């Protein structure tokens, strides 16, 4: 079985990932986190204190979350991602730093909220939890977010009806999960919705909270977004790749082989999970 390579610093990886996001998805992911913050730490309309967003990438989610905080720090292992994050326009009061989750470049007891969006599966959890305990203030909170595709409803051009592609989604998730498990690739944790990571966490009072997000886009954007995930991209450019097999099967199912993917509307639902740790 071939070995995978995790090259977080490839400039290409950083650019492809941050420019292929579905429109509005970073807002939806941030909203899940903001809703949970309100539920656990209601600031009554005031700003929260300090945010530390780890594995922040190009800072797409950090910048949105930062609007609710007095000050924010984004940390990422990749210098290419940090450079993209620093160059993007956004609210003030954010510092982006290169660094690793397992040894955070942050002083003890200075952080109110730690977030990790779509990056926990790359991190050595035992070492990272010790760092969370160290940097969080008493009463602080950590939120680790991931999402898994659960439904795709398809509408053809000029059509009113939506076709549910559930069996194809299940088949794609199953095949991706099988491949990730056999390669021992970190993506397997996203495909099990962080269940194994959560079960292994040694933190009293931990919680795993599920919600759903829904996004409407074109099939072309959906294909681009799925293939921006390095694991999915690494599976090749033919129907051997479960993502490409899914997109082609959707077009056949809906008899839209001759329709441009830009003109095929998809309503995409994700099962969003957040691990919540209270200090
Ligand atoms: C899938 S991206 C998520 C980026 C961002 N949170 C978002 O949702 O747009 C995962 C990020 O985790 C970073 N990463 C991986 N391992 C890390 C570690 N041990 N410490 C800090 N960052 C890490 C990668 O460089 C990458 O930018």
Image: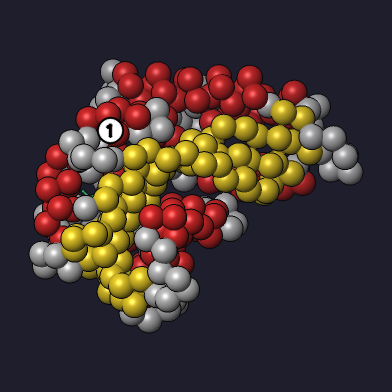
Colouring of the image: secondary structure
Front residue of 225 and 213: 213
Q: In the displayed image of the protein, which residue is found farthest to the bottom?
A: 92
Residue 88: x and y in percent read: 42, 73
Quarter assignment of residue 53: bottom left
Total count of labels: 1
The residue at 48%/20% (across/down) is 174
- Left of 251 or right of it: where is 270? left
Residue 33: x and y in percent read: 44, 55
Residue 117: x and y in percent read: 37, 51
Whether residue 240 is visible, yes or no, is yes
Check disc 1 and report its element: helix, strand or loop. Answer: helix
Front residue of 257 and 168: 168
- Left of 48 or right of it: where is 78? left
The residue at 11%/67% (across/down) is 107
For label 1, the residue is 197
- Left of 256 or right of it: where is 175? left
Quarter assignment of residue 188: top left
Is residue 107 placed above or below 181 in the rendered structure? below
- Left of 161 or right of it: where is 4? left
Is residue 115 placed above or below 247 in the rendered structure? below
Is residue 222 placed above or below 55 in the rendered structure? above
Answer yes or no: disc 1 within 8 Å of ligand 1. Answer: no
Front residue of 53 and 46: 46
Whether residue 86 is visible, yes or no, is no
Quarter assignment of residue 231: top left
The residue at 28%/47% (across/down) is 277
Q: Residues within 10 Å of mark 1 (few under 14, many from 20)?
A: some
Residue 212: x and y in percent read: 56, 42
The residue at 47%/39% (across/down) is 210
């Amino acid at each position: 079985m071939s070995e995978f390579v995790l090259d977080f610093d490839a400039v290409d990886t950083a650019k492809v990932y941050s420019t292929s996001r579905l429109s509005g998805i970073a807002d939806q992911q941030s909203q899940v986190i903001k809703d949970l913050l309100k539920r656990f730490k209601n600031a009554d309309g005031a700003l929260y204190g300090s945010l530390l967003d780890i594995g922040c990438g190009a800072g797409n989610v950090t910048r949105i979350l930062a609007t609710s905080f007095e000050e924010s720090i984004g940390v990422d292992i990749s210098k290419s991602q940090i450079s993209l994050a620093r160059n993007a326009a956004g609210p003030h009061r954010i510092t982006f730093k290169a660094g690793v989750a397992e040894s955070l470049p942050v002083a003890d007891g200075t952080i109110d909220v730690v977030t990790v969006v779509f990056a926990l599966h790359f991190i050595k959890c035992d070492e990272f939890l010790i760092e969370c305990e160290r940097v969080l203030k008493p009463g602080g909170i950590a939120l680790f977010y991931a999402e898994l595709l659960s439904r795709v409803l398809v509408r053809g051009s000029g059509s009113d009806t939506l076709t549910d592609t559930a069996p194809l989604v299940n088949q794609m998730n199953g095949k991706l999960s099988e491949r990730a498990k056999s390669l021992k690739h970190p993506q397997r944790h996203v495909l099990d919705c962080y269940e194994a990571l959560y079960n292994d966490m040694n933190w009293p009072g931990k919680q795993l909270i599920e919600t759903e997000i829904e996004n409407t886009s074109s099939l072309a954007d959906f294909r681009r977004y799925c293939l921006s995930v390095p694991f999915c991209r690494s599976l090749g450019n033919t129907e051997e790749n479960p993502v490409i097999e899914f997109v082609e099967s959707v077009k056949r199912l809906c008899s839209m082989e001759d329709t441009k993917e830009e003109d095929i509307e998809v309503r995409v639902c994700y099962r969003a999970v957040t691990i919540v740790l209270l200090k």
